[in-house]
Amino acid sequence: MRSAFLMAFILNIGLNLCSLLLLPETVAIHFSRGGRPDDWASKEMHVLLMILVDGLVFLPLYFAPRLFGRVPPRYLSLPYKQYWLRAENRRQVKSMLSQLMSEFGCALYGFLFGTALLALEANRSVPVRLDEPLFIIFLAIFLVYTIVWTIRLVVRLRPPGQT
């Protein structure tokens, strides 16, 4: 799953770099109600901002499980922390968190990829207009996934034998 997460990140970076070839010189970088653009930037600034966002999202999701063993316990927020921080359970929880973070990262980059495609299409159309209904569908799917993922996280972090 970590390799899928890494691939999703790379695909987003690739889409952003390819958009340099496809976007006009000035692009809408924010849209208001109805999909109308309300803020503009150069395509280079847009791509730079999107790559920075992708990187800032990637770093904590990818490296959080690795930092788990190095962060003092008082700084960790984890259900059933006393159980999972025992030496014999740390490897299991680290593996579980790595899997869950990678899954969430894939979903998040899927959402970002879809919205980047919508923004690319919007900026190539005349007049510039975001497909707001499709964006809302993407957002709703991602929010439902996030709720389900959060519930799975809490359930999976219950110590064995607890229901």
Image (cartoon, helix red, strand yellow):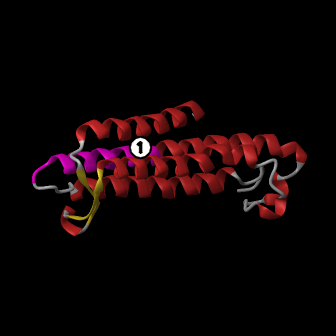
Instruction: Report the front residue among 65 and 163.
Output: 65
Q: Which of the 4 quarters of the picture holds residue 16?
A: top left
Residue at the (45%, 46%) spot, across then down: 51
* Residue at numbered disc 1: 110
The residue lying at 37 percent from left, 47 percent from top is: 47
User: Can you give x and y, in whole percent of width and height, for residue 18 in the image?
Assistant: 33, 35
The amino acid pointed to by label 1 is Gly
Mark 1: which secondary structure?
helix
Task: Residue at 49% x, 39% y: name it.
Answer: 9
Is residue 104 visible in this depiction of the protein? no
Q: Toward the viewer: 94 or 60?
A: 60
Neighbours of disc 1 within 10 Å: few (<14), some (14-19), many (20+): some
**Residue range corresponding to the magenta coloring:** 108-126
As for residue 66 lying within the magenta part, the answer is no
Q: Residue at x 30, y 40 (%)?
A: 20
Is any part of residue 120 visible from this angle? yes
Quadrant in the rendering for residue 38: bottom left
Q: Is the stretch drawn in magenta largely helix, strand or loop?
A: helix
Q: Is 32 rendered above or below residue 44? A: below
